Image (spheres, rainbow, N blue to C red):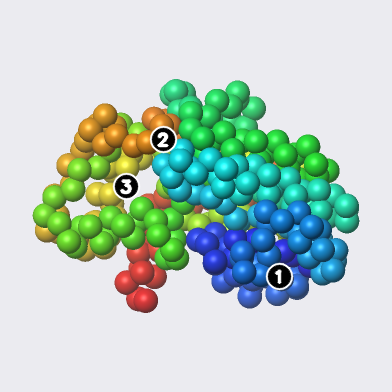
Amino acid sequence: MKILITGANGQLGNEMRVLANANATHTYFFTDVEELDICNEQAVNDFVNQHEIDIIVNCAAYTAVDAAEDNQELNDRLNHLAPGYLARAAQSRGAAMIQVSTDYVFDGTNHTPYTEDEPTCPASVYGTAKLAGEKNVMDHCQQAVVIRTAWLYSIYGNNFVKTMIRLGKERDALGVIFDQVGTPTYARDLAVAIYAIINKGVVRGIYHFSNEGVCSWYDFTVAIHRLAGITNCKVNPIHTADYPTKAARPHYSVLDKTKIKNTFGIEIPHWEASLVDCIQLLKSN
């Protein structure tokens, strides 16, 4: 199959690139904005038809959650409109599409893990655009999969894990929010899941994927420092109210992964086991 992967220089796109070697039966087109501007509908159509694409994996997104509140037009173009262009281009060729979405489509008022069927209620401009992007993809591509994920990190780009390691080395103490609960997702594990969907065949629908287990940002940071060997920085738990942000965050965004595991036979590692793998790679680089 001929597979187009957009946002190839991001965390997930880079992990898809690494794992392409283990899935060498396919032909890949890894693009970022320099190679393909997904906000240009004509360029998207031309690329998909010229290269006879069979599957589009959209890893591109505007992910600056707070900045999205001020840059609403760009956020809407990348997270809402562009996925629709990709979906329509896929549909015109009878191709499939995998769209990566977010836990921010929920407002975080649940106390039990969110299933795919629960009502969405985004509390931020970012979450609203991502939800509109999901709908755009499902409405315009027959063979569409939407994967909602959360708390993504990897050895690539900027992310919470790398920031906490850097701050842990620079500071004597850190205040980290303890009353927002969710599950970290190692981008490599998500990439493995996406390849499982590609190789087993797309089954239309919305799915949830994160690592297994539950933690707060505070718990996550304590584990990051322990595994990175940082001992001279005290991590203090703080309330969300003590760290105001422009965009509202879900207080509880644990995702129920039953559907994706049952549909595609995917086994998902615990978040701490995956964090061990990532930090070992960071140390060796």
- Looking at the image, tell me whether mark 2 or mark 3 is earlier in sequence order: 3
- Looking at the image, tell me whether mark 3 or mark 1 is earlier in sequence order: 1
Expressed as whole percent of the image width and height from the top left, the position of residue 52 reads 85, 66
Query: Which SS class for mark 2?
Result: loop
Q: Is residue 231 above or below residue 258?
A: below
The structure residue drawn at horizontal position 70% and vertical position 36%, both measured from the top left corner, is 135
Q: Amino acid at mark 2?
A: Ala
Q: Is residue 139 above or below residue 164?
A: above
Front-lying residue, 135 or 118: 135
Q: Are marks 3 and 1 in contact (CB under 8 Å)?
A: no
Mark 2 sits on what residue? 247
The residue carrying pointer 3 sits among few (fewer than 14), some (14 to 19) or many (20 or more) residues within 10 Å by Cα, namely many
Checking the image for residue 29, the label placed there is 1
Mark 3 sits on what residue? 220
Viewer-nearest of discs 2 and 3 = 2
Report, in whole angstroms, how far the alpha carbon at label 2 lies from the one at label 1.
34 Å
Quadrant for the C terminus, please. bottom left
Residue 169 in sight: yes
Expressed as whole percent of the image width and height from the top left, the position of residue 232 reads 12, 58
Residue 180 relative to residue 201: left or right: left
Residue 224 relative to residue 270: left or right: left
Viewer-nearest of discs 2 and 1 = 2
Report, in whole angstroms, how far the alpha carbon at label 3 lies from the one at label 1.
35 Å
